[in-house]
Image (spheres, rainbow, N blue to C red):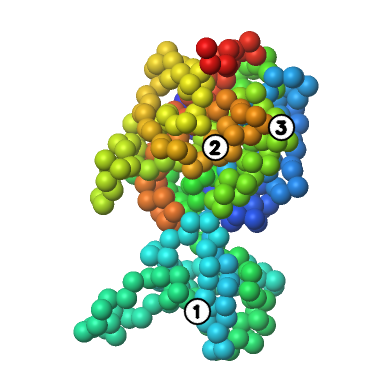
Amino acid sequence: MKFEKKSLKFLEKYLNTSSPTGYEHEGQKIWMDYIRPYVDKVEVDHYGTCYGIINPEAEFKVVIEAHADEISWYVNYITDDGLIYVIRNGGSDQTIAPSKIVHIHGEKGIVKGVFGWPAIHTRTNQNEPTPKIENIFIDCGATTKEEVENMGIYVGCMITYPDEFFEMNDRYFVCRALDNRIGGFMIAEVARLLKENKKTIPFGLYITNSVQEEVGLYGADMIADTIKPNIAIVTDVTHDTTTPMIEKKKEGDQKCGAGPVVFFAPSVHHTIRELIIQTAKSKNIPFQRAAASRATGTDTDAFAHSNGGVPSALISLPLRYMHTTVEMVAKEDVRNVIQLIYETLLEIQPEIKLKYH
């Protein structure tokens, strides 16, 4: 399976569009426009979760899901001399902030700023300062609080990084926010393949791009109650643990290029997981295994624990440097996640036995 030119064009535009938690709408517009030709119906809930439906009249419902939001910062405090202090919106990493360019989404449009940091020359003969929420700050070139506010910047404005998509060594996709708009791309490609290959499925398929995962799985929690699916297959990213300073005994052994990661966890339903594994084996799709204690930390948990319990499974994409602006995924893994979800859907029948015996 090769990536279509139109697919890559969509991916680049989608990734380059800011979609911070609570402000996902611009990215969601692009996603909906892309999937519209491949589904029978498109819906949006009150908080911005979008989903395309194939066979909307079917009683048996299957969800394939990713989350649309990216981490970011909020303006939290503006000093009298025009510097901006921040709080997190999701799991933003303060250690990568110094010297990063930012986009402040103000009332008058985007304003550029930088995360400042004291020069190395001024840090000699003292304890090396560590970036913390309390000491990182943004300089937007203003000298007073009034000047900052005249730019349209106030407490509560969203702050994102502008780092854009590129391909590396013909092997990796690199961008901020691959966690998890790459998931939105993959489920959209599944919808495209079903349509273009003229496949019919005997159930309603809900291709779902949820909001607010990064702050507590809230979008998935809401949409699970709306759709009330019989099965949910979630895709998200997980750590490539082969890079330096990661402890495999704690984080497991997964790597980019070795295939999708199928998770074992209390919220993962055995029947759905085994169907995925057997599909991977029968279709010669490489895959890896990983385990999660207590919770997966993904939207899988929200779906599994909704509506009295929804049989759910998690297929993850190995990713390097999570929650930085240089997240990396192997192109071959992206292809294989798409193919694994696609082939698994073709194996599902409404008569599937989901109860434990």
Q: Which residue is mark 1?
A: 139
Q: Mark 2 belongs to which amino acid?
A: Asp
Which percent across, then down, holds residue 155? 63, 74
Q: For the view shown, which residue lies furthest in the right direction?
A: 57
> Could you tell me how far apart the alpha carbons at marks 3 and 2 are, in whole angstroms?
16 Å
Which percent across, then down, holds residue 324? 42, 56
Q: Mark 1 belongs to which amino acid?
A: Asp
Which percent across, then down, holds residue 214? 54, 51
Q: Sequence-wise, which precedes: disc 1 or disc 3?
A: 1
Q: Residue at x 50, y 79 (%)?
A: 139
Task: State the image quarter where residue 281 is shown.
Answer: top left
Q: Which residue is mark 2?
A: 301
In the drawing, what numbered circle is on residue 266? none
Q: Residue at x 57, y 16 (%)?
A: 355
| Mark 1 or 3, closer to the camera | 3
Disc 3 on helix, strand or loop?
Answer: helix
> Could you tell me how far apart the alpha carbons at marks 1 and 3 are, in whole angstroms?
45 Å
Q: Which residue is mark 3?
A: 227
The answer to whether residue 75 is visible is yes
